[in-house]
Image (cartoon, grey):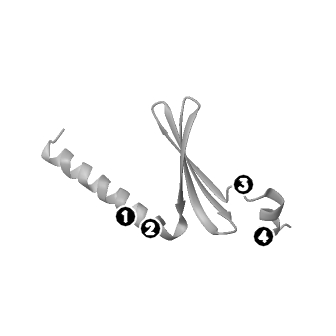
Amino acid sequence: MIGYEEDRERRGSDYPIHTEKVFADRKIFFLDLKENDRGRFVKITEDVRGRRDTIMLPIEVLDDFIAALQAIADADAEADRRGDD
């Protein structure tokens, strides 16, 4: 059986540790947990009909990023309750 470190070396740093996909209309968002010599990070890629935009999110700020997204979701839910457009 191949261990994590051996597998990572065999695959190279470009291979994701974990991947999620989110589909939204004509867009696909790829969320990849990756690792390089500087540490782990989340690569977020938006694909719109073959055109891609990407951001890299250091794992150290992942919790802050998730909290910010949750605050936006909460604000949207509150706007829905109030009937805002």
Q: What amino acid does circle 1 point to?
A: Ala
Q: Is residue 60 left or right of residue 64?
A: right
**Residue drawn at x 70%, y 68% as measured from the top left:** 37
Q: What's the CA distance linking mark 2 and mark 4? A: 25 Å
Mark 4 surroundings: few (<14), some (14-19) or many (≥20) residues within 10 A: few
Q: Earlier in the sequence, mark 1 or mark 4?
A: 4
> Which residue position holds label 1?
67
Labels 1 & 2 near each other (Cβ < 8 A): yes
> Which residue position holds label 2?
63
Q: What amino acid does circle 4 point to?
A: Glu
Labels 1 & 3 near each other (Cβ < 8 A): no
Location of residue 54 in the rendering, given as x and y in whole percent from the top left corner: 54, 47
Find the residue positioned furthest to the front: 38
> Which residue position holds label 4?
5
Secondary structure type for disc 2: helix
Location of residue 3 in the rendering, given as x and y in whole percent from the top left corner: 80, 70
Secondary structure type for disc 4: helix
> Which residue position holds label 3?
15
Q: What's the CA distance linking mark 3 and mark 2? A: 23 Å
Quadrant where the C terminus sits is: top left
Q: Earlier in the sequence, mark 2 or mark 4?
A: 4
Q: What amino acid does circle 2 point to?
A: Asp
Secondary structure type for disc 3: loop
Whether residue 3 is visible to the viewer of this picture, yes or no, is no
**Residue drawn at x 78%, y 70% as measured from the top left:** 5
Q: Earlier in the sequence, mark 3 or mark 4?
A: 4
Residue 65 in which image quadrant: bottom left
Q: Earlier in the sequence, mark 3 or mark 2?
A: 3
